[in-house]
Image: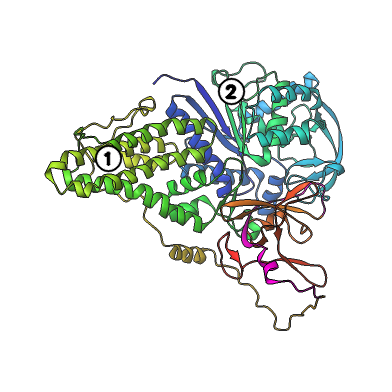
Amino acid sequence: MANKGKFYMTTAIAYTSGKPHIGNTYEIVLADAIARYKRQEGYDVYFQTGTDEHGQKIELKAEEKGVTPKEYVDEVSGEVKKIWDLMNTSYDNFIRTTDEDHEKQVQKIFKKLYDKGDIYKGSYEGLYCTPCESFWTESQLVDGKCPDCGREVQPAKEEAYFFKMSKYADRLIEHINTHPEFIQPVSRKNEMMNNFLLPGLQDLCVSRTSFSWGIPVDFDPKHVVYVWLDALTNYITKIGYDADGNSSDLFKKNWPADLHLIGKDIIRFHTIYWPIFLMALDLPLPKQVFGHPWLLQGDGKMSKSKGNVLYADELVDFFGVDAVRYFVLHEMPFENDGVISWELLVERLNSDLANTLGNLVNRTISMSNKYFDGVVEDKGVSEDVDADLKAVVTGTVAKVEAKMTDLRVADAMTEIFNLFKRCNKYIDETTPWVLAKDEATKPRLATVLYNLVESISIGATLLHSFMPETAEKILAQLNAKEVAYDELFTFGHYVSGTKVTDAPEILFARLDIEEVMKKVNELHPPVEEEAPASDEPVIDIEAKPEIEYDDFMKMQFQVGEIIKCEEVPKSKKLLCSQVKIGSQVKQIVSGIKKHYTAEEMVGKKVMVLVNLKPAKLAGVLSEGMLLCAEDENGELALMTPEKKMPSGAEIC
């Protein structure tokens, strides 16, 4: 296969504030699937990941544990790398921002920008968010809190160095407008342009003096380099960029990056700060920045304080590496947040992996052994149904390629599993067990089994980027050679006369949800709720006029699940929820911000008035109403089902 050229891709480097949960781990698995697929296509891939290890938050956490910051980040970075390796990710380089070569280059970059006049010394007075390592003005706050994370901010004043962001703003706006592929998905681009670039950029604080855990500014050592200038430059320092002009061949080969894969919460830093830093260094900009959505727990955004955090190693113990890879890749939409839960994992393993895929492979190998002692031969006895199967199989390759070009990884996996579903349908259409009863139809039976083995081989080859261990197991059991990517578009590469394995391995065993949840509850005992008091107060309210039964029947009430919730900008009362009701999602705006945080809302099962006429509240469309109870003090409580009910269940 001809080399299609270089492809340099990166993940965001994981912040070493603690062990990464499955939502953090999703990004490295997504990046790995893309990297593996690009290699399969014929690209010379260089895939970089790593850990971000400086900042005030790290200094404080280390102090809490009674260790040095370096000791703290050594432990956490090791944990990150351990999980990345557990998930079978094929990165080429793992950078730590405490690496000596990185720190040296950051100092040289800072001095170069200072000498150029893009960095100047001043002082900063503002409101500081420690978790985000960000300064804000009063006007930028939302309800007096950090606009990024919603936490409290503290007044801070200190001497600092600043970067002249506005100097490059017009150039960046022009680049974004002339390169529509630069920021993906498009919704992220619109957010950056409308909320940050077009209103005008303020100069950026790029050093700190109030803490010491960072890279010192070598010509003014009481300052340490601001974490984002330190962290973002990892994409060039670790492949050999040198601010003095002596960059390595690896850098010259791979820069600019073809893809920065990051979470949507740090899109601003990668599409505004980072491109401007590069412009100031006279370096080309990355070709694409993709801000992926979040993976949320079934009962809300993952939070250690809520005790609902899922970790990759724990999930792997239950389901295996490839089952977890399948879930996080297949269940994450392109733009919207995905949801993970123990129940959903069991459901997908049983239906997609054990049934659609595992049973198909097992049946095909078992029939080959039963009817032909495992020897698979193409006897050339074809029927019309064969042509449709072959068209679906070879057509899948182009469909997967198109989806992966657009980074629609979940859709690409759906296409592969559609191939496996078509194989299962082919078995039902050709009825091999009937053909086996008559010696005269044995040649037709042999051809059917050959077509199945070849189809599964092509499907497994395509599956390799997403579930590498499973793909290798399937090909090994079929004794199939891996076919070059360019040849997957044609049918018939499996060598006729090849013998499959004598005893097919069960790829995925079905699990019992009750047994799984029993084990989960043993590991994580549910928090017991206090029993309600027997003498709770009651409230009498003024009665409204009676209505007819027909009036009531006009209203449609259903159970909904809140899969995403955000504060409505510039509103003190409103939250905007995305509510899954059956197979559809409705946007509902509610005046409950005083009573619930956006984080608390996610994952709740609620009662919804579905057919309320849509209306705009504070300029945001609302397509229904969440039902609440209100006490005499005006406190609200969402109405939730007493028992476990599926999304979409009718309330009657």
Q: Look at label 1 and name its amino acid.
A: Leu
- Residue at the top extreme? 245
517 within the magenta span: no
10 Å crowding of disc 2: few (<14), some (14-19), many (20+): many
Q: Please state the extent of the stretch shown in magenta in the rendering.
A: 543-572
Horizontal side of residue 16 vs 345, given as left or right? right
Q: Which residue is mark 2?
A: 240
Q: Say which mark, if any, is on residue 244.
A: none
Query: How far from the left and from the top, in percent, is residue 121?
Result: 84, 28
Indicate the secondary structure of the residue bearing disc 1: helix
Q: Position of residue 499 (x, y in %)?
A: 20, 39
Residue at point 51%, 57% (across, down)? 342
Q: Give the mark, 1 or 2, whose residue is nearer the N terminus.
A: 2
Q: Is residue 164 visible?
A: no
The answer to which of 413 and 223 lies nearer the viewer is 413
Residue displayed at 68% across by 45% down: 58
- Counting other residues with Cα less than 10 Å from the Cα at mark 1, is it few (<14), some (14-19), or many (20 or more)? many
Image coords of residue 421 (percent x, y):
38, 45
> How many numbered discs sit on the rendered protein?
2
